[in-house]
Amino acid sequence: MEHRNISIADQVFEQLERDILAGKYARGELLSEQRLSAELGVSRTPVREAIRRLEQENLLEDAGRGVVIVGITHEDMLDMYEIRLQLEGLAARRAAENVSEEQLQEMREALDLQHFYCDRERSDSSDQIKNMDSRFHELMYAASGSKAYSDVLCRLHKKIAKYRKASVRKHSRAEESVNEHEAIFEALAAHDPDRAEAAALSHLRNARATMAEMEL
Amino acid sequence: MEHRNISIADQVFEQLERDILAGKYARGELLSEQRLSAELGVSRTPVREAIRRLEQENLLEDAGRGVVIVGITHEDMLDMYEIRLQLEGLAARRAAENVSEEQLQEMREALDLQHFYCDRERSDSSDQIKNMDSRFHELMYAASGSKAYSDVLCRLHKKIAKYRKASVRKHSRAEESVNEHEAIFEALAAHDPDRAEAAALSHLRNARATMAEMEL
DNA sequence: ACAGTTATACTACTATGCAAGTATCCTGTC
DNA sequence: GACAGGATACTTGCATAGTAGTATAACTGT
């Protein structure tokens, strides 16, 4: 059971983050906490909290009166993949050395669910697949045993995931992706750093290629 | 002129961040917004905002009632240097290609001020040197032209800087540091990516070595 | 008609009040 | 003496009101 209930402030944050990363707002568009709170039907206090957190993520920027949308471009996304290519291999190496049996089991469950949702063809299966993708990666980051790597990579992965959710399609890639996850998992379970690094990088290169093909 | 005045919320955030990164609080120590607001003599509202932003930075964590200190270990710091070693060379390459004359001028000013503060022996010169160090690096990140690189590297540099401020000494390193900055600057001014990358990495390795020697 | 000044309206920031949930401590009973 | 149950006090979350500062627009005077 989670400690804190899902607060209105959290909901506002999640929704705004999703909308910004999905490109719902134009760069430079002005947002005021009053208008937002009126639109969402909540008081200004939780909206303020959400705005401050989004500023902390460099998704919004102070503009004197209100805040302006900073948002993310396609090039930013490709840069994020480049950064992950520099880091995620090393994180996978560490994870292969440090991963515990319990963590392997959790990753196994995430993988099984990913297979499960891949087989079905329900309307929300795509979202569920992406959720399990996030879960798998975050478990690997945690398994690296490094808070620094985990912090940076979680942040990047979360942004990329929400960006990709905006442009769904590519069900084919889902199956490739889960198979690549399997390869990573096997390397981690075998505690083989070299294979883990190679598998992680291969997975990333493929994901980046898919991203690069989009929106041209 | 800045848009937003320095608010109480910002001050609380800065102070708490500094104190946490300086190791003033023990890992797992419990903080409540009420106690903090009473201690600081302000209302709970700005304290709440500061706490939420610090949670966003993974420096605090929800604990049901209040938040607990997560903080940063020496090993985390070394990992952050490792991450920077993976990224900052590439950022320097890009900066060498993209830096504008105006940006070079700003970096020149930061460097000059750093020289200036190095020569004096005033009590606050150490802080000023570190401020100029931050400024120089952040200008380089911005010059890379990549929001993704800049976001990640700024975050890392800021944390490292506040951590190092806790353990001042090593005036000797200040002069080496500014000389290494000069080397980076010259490479950027010459728009030479190879030299910029090499200079940035050399600078980082030296800084990491100093960090590694500390607190053993 | 244009410029300068004033007034109005809107912005964010902080404080406080109120409600809901939870942990703790005390008391009563077995 | 130990355990269970309830009351109390403390916690955060949300809303709102008051304040200060600013930008804009309107109005007046030249």
Image (spheres, coloured by chain):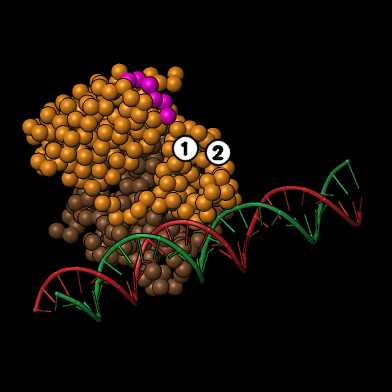
Chain colours: A brown, B orange, C red, D green
Q: Is label 1 in a helix, a strand or a loop? A: helix
Whether residue A141 is visible to the viewer of this picture, yes or no, is no
Quote the CA–CA distance across marks 2 and 1.
11 Å
Q: Residue at x 9, y 41 (%)?
A: B101
Query: What are the residue bounds of the magenta stretch?
Result: B166-171
The answer to whether residue D7 is left or right of residue A27 is: right
Whether residue B118 is visible to the viewer of this picture, yes or no, is yes
Could you say which quadrant of the image residue B183 lies in? Answer: top left
Label 2 crowd (10 A; few <14 / some 14-19 / many >=20): some
Which of the labelled discs sits on residue A51, or is there none? Answer: none
Which x, y percent locates residue A45?
46, 63
Q: Residue at x 50, y 61 (%)?
A: A7
- Circle nearer the N terminus (2, 1): 1
Question: Do callouts 2 and 1 mark residues in contact (Cβ within 8 Å)?
Answer: no
Could you say which quadrant of the image residue A107 lies in? Answer: top left
In this figure, which residue is indicated by the disc labeled 2?
A: B28
Label 1 crowd (10 A; few <14 / some 14-19 / many >=20): many
User: Given the image, on which type of amino acid does mark 2 rest?
Assistant: Gly
User: Given the image, on which type of amino acid does mark 1 rest?
Assistant: Ile
In this figure, which residue is indicated by the disc labeled 1?
A: B20
Q: Which one is nearer the viewer's eye here, A138 or B142?
A: B142
Which part of the image, by quadrant, shows the C terminus of chain B?
top left
Q: Is label 2 in a helix, a strand or a loop? A: loop
Q: Which one is nearer the viewer's eye here, A158 or A191?
A: A158
Q: Residue at x 42, y 46 (%)?
A: B11
Q: Looking at the magenta stretch, what is its main secondary structure? A: loop
Q: Are marks 2 and 1 on the same chain?
A: yes
Which x, y percent locates residue A3?
56, 52
Q: Chain of mark 2?
A: B
Which x, y percent locates residue A41?
44, 73
